């Protein structure tokens, strides 16, 4: 599948300034000059005006984990798999990952950056429904932001390895999820040391609109074992389940 990719910057916070972003969308979804650009006619059924369905059915704001950045191999491979499954993605850096050194930004800055990234996605969605989430820390930042103030127009949250706990196993990090109004999808590895399934499953079950998909033999970074019970590549599984959830 052909993918249109655009790199640009947006303001994370007034104090921290601009950060980089990459918008990747299956070709034919709009957002570029030419026949598939924003001025091309769109059918009421989401077609491109010629009767052909749009190549993407959703746009996912995809944040990275705490120790990486938007160009990390995991992020690139996941974005590519999502594009192949019909999901456009907007990857972004936080101010600390934009600099490439030093400690992680404080929570206030990360929450503001997440909100700015989602607003940027909405401005570039070309009619696609907007979802948000990311790997580990970023997924938690999205849900934390939503728990404090709902984000208008956000259709749902996708967690790729929600970091439920560190070495001490408890569910304190999940308390805020009860205040989240948006639907939530949790994709979690069977061997994830930061999300014991005996703790995560009850958390998800207690939420009003949440789904848990367990990835066989996967760890927190979605590395899998050879004895995995499926031949489906793990990135394709993550993308397929996410795409189906975003377009039921």
Image (cartoon, grey):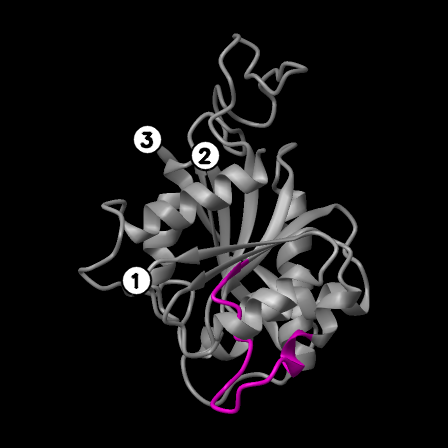
Instruction: Name the image quarter holding the C terminus.
Output: top right
Residue 203 visible? The answer is yes
Categorize mark 2 by other alpha carbons within 10 Å: few (<14), some (14-19), many (20+). many
Q: Which residue is mark 2?
A: 86
Q: Which mark is residue 1?
A: 3
Left or right: 166, with 73 as reference point? right
Left or right: 32, with 140 as reference point? left
Which residue is painted at 76% across and 67% down in the image? 178
Left or right: 110, with 146 as reference point? left
Alpha carbon distance from label 2 to label 3 = 9 Å
User: Depth check: 72 or 174 in front?
Assistant: 174
Sequence-first disc among 3 and 1: 3
For the residues bearing labels 2 and 3, Cβ distance under 8 angstroms: no
Categorize mark 1 by other alpha carbons within 10 Å: few (<14), some (14-19), many (20+). few
Q: Which residues are magenta?
A: 159-174
Residue 12 visible? The answer is no
Q: Which residue is mark 1?
A: 73
Q: Give the image quarter of residue 192.
A: bottom left
């Amino acid at each position: 599948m052909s993918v249109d990719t655009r790199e640009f910057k947006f303001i994370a916070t007034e104090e921290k300034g601009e950060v980089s972003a990459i918008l990747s969308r299956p070709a034919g979804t709009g957002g570029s000059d030419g026949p598939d650009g924003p001025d091309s006619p769109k059918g009421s059924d989401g077609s491109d005006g010629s009767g052909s369905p749009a190549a993407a059915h959703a746009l996912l704001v995809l944040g990275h984990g705490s120790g990486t950045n938007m160009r990390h191999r995991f992020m690139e491979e996941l974005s590519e798999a999502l594009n192949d499954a019909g999901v456009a993605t907007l990857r972004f850096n936080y101010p600390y990952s934009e600099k490439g050194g030093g400690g992680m930004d404080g929570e206030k800055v990360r929450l503001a950056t997440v909100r700015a990234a989602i607003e940027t996605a909405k401005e570039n969605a070309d009619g696609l429904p907007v979802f948000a989430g990311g790997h580990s820390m970023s997924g938690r930042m999205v849900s934390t932001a939503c728990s404090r103030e709902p984000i208008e127009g956000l259709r749902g949250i996708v967690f790729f390895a929600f970091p439920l706990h560190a070495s001490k196993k408890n569910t304190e990090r999940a308390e805020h999820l009860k205040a989240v109004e948006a639907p939530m999808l949790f994709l979690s590895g069977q061997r994830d040391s930061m999300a014991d399934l005996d703790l995560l499953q009850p958390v998800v079950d207690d939420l009003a609109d949440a789904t848990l998909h367990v990835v066989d033999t996967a760890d927190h970074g979605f590395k899998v074992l050879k004895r995995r019970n499926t031949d489906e590549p793990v990135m394709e599984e993550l993308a397929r389940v996410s795409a189906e959830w975003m377009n039921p």
